[in-house]
Image: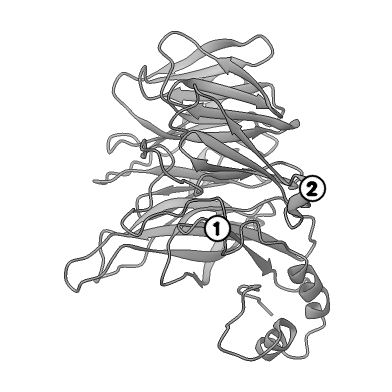
């Protein structure tokens, strides 16, 4: 049996308890006896009444993390620590809220701290160091801010400012960053505060950089350019991978994002197409386009997230506003079931959406649940919702 989504906020129009509602959907299934207590134990990070956190205005459109430079609430940019206890959320263009999820239901215990500096402006990217849950790298207009709890250190180098992307290597020894001003990708030895110029692009903007989380050491660079799609660097030699087949995507609105799991496969999204990349074999093993939508042909993928166990893929799709028929912009989250072995497979499960608000970002936080995963969704009203997903029963 396949559970599509086990949502804590079940349909309010039904006068039922969560347990009754779930048993109506999947009667006589013993797995629910484990799933229900797990789902009910999951805290809301930001309840609907978000006192102290300014909401988005209804006129704002969903944006990627590097496209907005005005001072506003941008809770769509968030990241969990590797242990899953803490989350960092950008609540203004110069302010980060660090929340202790175990304490956030008890305001008197100091469940939230704010990270703010007069030099920290227009935050575009954040990343926790994998080996140090209290160390956070922040890419912003003035460079790279390194927070260790409340202590602040700055990484600066020549014209490497307007930093739009930051990413840590799996062992936490290297920090990669991209500057929108000098168009350079730097690798930082944080202990020495010294950078190495990995690549310098005179014309190509970068929309995503990410170290692989599997055993192999690779750095992915996604370009926001119709001429080039992506580059994968081998960290052993710092040379671009030579792919067996050349795959090129041309689109009017390029945006290349990657999602990793604990295997050699990576999922790449570009505009309205998805690719499965076998890093070890240096080949694209699967491709799929979003289904045609005659009502809104300009829809595009703005974010993707893959469960670490490689069983669920979430795809955030943005539908721009239309004039005929009159309709505002909206977002849908497509949920897929995936399998990497013995061959890569993927099939569509269903949609997660809210007609009145739109999603700004998605992520799979760490979870020790053996039969499911959590999907975190940030909404434009200033909340983050955790959606429990229960996997198919194992034979």
**The one of 322 and 149 positioned closer to us in this rendering:** 149
Residue identifier under label 1 = 383
Give the label on residue 112, or none.
none
Residue at 75 percent across and 30 percent down: it is 131
| Colour scheme in use | one colour
Q: Whole-percent x and y of residue 179? A: 42, 22
Q: Whole-percent x and y of residue 206? A: 39, 31
**Callout 1 environment at 10 Å: few (<14), some (14 to 19), or many (20+)?**
many
Residue at 25 percent across and 70 percent down: it is 327
Residue at 44 percent across and 53 percent down: it is 274
**The one of 184 and 112 positioned closer to us in this rendering:** 112
Looking at the image, residue 68 lies above or below residue 305: above
| The furthest residue to the left | 324
Quarter of the image for the N terminus: give it: bottom right
Question: Is residue 309 shown left or right of residue 69?
Answer: right
**Callout 2 environment at 10 Å: few (<14), some (14 to 19), or many (20+)?**
few
If you read the primary sequence from the N terminus, does the residue marked by circle 2 or circle 1 appear first?
2
CB-based contact (under 8 Å), mark 2 and mark 1:
no
Looking at the image, residue 29 lies above or below residue 167: below
Q: Whole-percent x and y of residue 296? A: 26, 66
Q: Is residue 341 visible?
A: yes
Give the secondary structure at mark 1: strand
Quarter of the image for the C terminus: give it: bottom right
**The one of 105 and 74 positioned closer to us in this rendering:** 105
- For residue 72, what is the image quadrant? top left
Q: CA distance from mark 2 to mark 1?
A: 21 Å
Residue identifier under label 2 = 109
Looking at the image, residue 204 lies above or below residue 363: above
């Amino acid at each position: 049996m396949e559970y599509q989504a086990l949502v804590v906020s079940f349909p309010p129009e039904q006068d039922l308890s969560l347990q009754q509602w779930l048993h109506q959907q999947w009667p006589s299934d013993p797995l629910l006896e484990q799933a229900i207590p797990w789902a009910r134990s999951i805290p809301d990070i930001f309840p609907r009444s978000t006192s102290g956190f300014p909401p988005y205005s209804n006129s704002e459109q969903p944006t990627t993390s590097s496209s907005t430079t005005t001072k506003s609430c941008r809770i769509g940019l968030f990241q969990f620590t590797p242990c899953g206890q803490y989350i960092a959320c950008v609540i203004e263009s110069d302010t980060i809220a660090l929340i202790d999820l175990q304490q956030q239901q008890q305001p008197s215990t100091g469940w939230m701290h704010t990270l703010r500096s007069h030099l920290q402006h227009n935050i575009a990217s954040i990343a926790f160091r994998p080996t140090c849950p209290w160390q956070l790298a922040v890419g912003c207009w003035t460079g790279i801010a390194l927070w260790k709890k409340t202590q602040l250190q700055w990484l600066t180098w020549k014209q490497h400012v307007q930093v739009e992307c930051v990413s840590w290597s799996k062992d936490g020894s290297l920090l990669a960053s991209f500057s929108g001003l000098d168009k350079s990708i730097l690798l930082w030895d944080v202990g020495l505060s010294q950078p190495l110029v990995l690549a310098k692009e005179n014309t190509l903007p970068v929309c995503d950089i990410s170290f692989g989380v599997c055993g192999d050491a690779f750095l992915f660079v996604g370009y926001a350019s119709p001429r080039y799609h992506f580059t994968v660097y081998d960290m052993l030699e710092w040379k671009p991978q030579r792919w067996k087949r050349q795959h090129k995507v041309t689109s009017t609105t390029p945006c290349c994002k990657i999602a990793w799991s604990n295997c050699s496969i990576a999922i790449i999204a570009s505009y309205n197409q998805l690719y499965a990349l076998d890093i070890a074999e240096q080949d694209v093993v699967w491709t799929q386009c979003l289904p045609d939508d005659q009502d809104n042909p300009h829809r595009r993928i703005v974010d993707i997230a893959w469960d670490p166990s490689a069983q669920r893929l979430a795809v955030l799709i943005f539908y721009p506003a239309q004039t005929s028929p009159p309709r505002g912009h909206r977002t849908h989250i497509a949920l897929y079931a995936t399998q990497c072995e013995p061959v890569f497979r993927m099939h569509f499960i269903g949609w997660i959406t809210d007609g009145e608000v739109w999603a700004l970002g998605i992520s799979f936080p760490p979870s020790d649940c053996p039969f499911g995963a959590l999907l975190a969704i940030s909404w434009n009203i200033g909340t983050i919702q955790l959606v429990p997903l229960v996997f198919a029963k194992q034979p």
